[in-house]
Image (cartoon, helix red, strand yellow):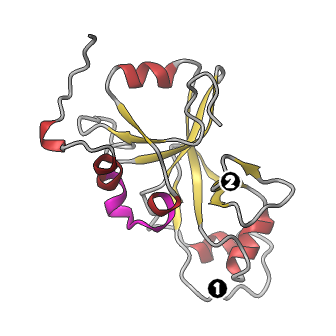
Amino acid sequence: MQKNNYLTGKCLAAMPNMTDERFANTLIYICSHTENGAMGFVVNRKITEFSFADLAGQLPIANLNPNLPIDLYQGGPLEKVRGFVLHSTDYIKDDTVVIDEKIAISSSIDIITDIAFGVGPKDNLIALGYASWAPHQLEQEIIQNTWMVVDPSPELVFRTKDEDKWHKAIEDLGIDLSRLSSFAGKA
């Protein structure tokens, strides 16, 4: 439920003119947005230099032998060693924060263990690090034409190929990228 036009539970698609390479062509899921700022996770950039097995080796997970490959994502530039799991609401534990009826977030070792053994949430995305905005910073960036606000779906966040998520989000808005201006304006 959205209050005061805050963007909790929405996605941000970087505008094509994004010059910050950490966020160029990214899709970010906003898990918290209040008068105190915002926090979210990049959901379309896999980590290639560090694997789930590497992560599990740093945690007390015994007998790790995942059935399927498990990807890790660059959640954002802050606290890159801190892990979060964005996931479907079919999995709820004590530390889970339910964002909306379809998506929740957890950060305990239990969910990592459950994912490793195939008993975790149906849909999940493990993010290391996060993106954060100071009070009113995100609103200013949107006014300055840095981000487009997108209604997310589990299909977009969890099941669309990473290299297609950004384009799909913009396409879902009905925007033709070739006609998009990089200039902000006021009517």
> Is 185 positioned to the left or the right of 131 in the image?
left
| Residue 66, numbered label | 1
Task: Tell me whether circle 1 and circle 2 mark residues in contact (CB < 8 Å).
Answer: no
Q: How many residues crowd mark 2 within 10 Å: few (<14), some (14–19), many (20+)?
A: many
Q: Residue at x 34, y 52 (%)?
A: 166
Give the residue furthest to the right.
94
Please tell me whether residue 62 belongs to the stretch shown in magenta: no
Q: Is residue 83 visible?
A: no
Q: How many residues crowd mark 1 within 10 Å: few (<14), some (14–19), many (20+)?
A: some
- For the N terminus, give its image quadrant: top right
Q: Amino acid at mark 2?
A: Ala
- Residue 63: x and y in percent read 76, 88
The total number of labels drawn is 2
| Residue 46, numbered label | none
Q: Amino acid at mark 1?
A: Pro
**Circle 2 SS class:** strand
Prevailing SS of the magenta stretch: helix
Specify the segment rendered in magenta.
157-166
- Residue 72: x and y in percent read 54, 65
Q: Residue at x 38, y 67 (%)?
A: 161
- Where on the picture, by quarter, is residue 40? top right
- Where on the picture, by quarter, is residue 13? top left
Is 1 placed above or below 133 here? Answer: below
> Is 170 positioned to the left or the right of 88 in the image?
left
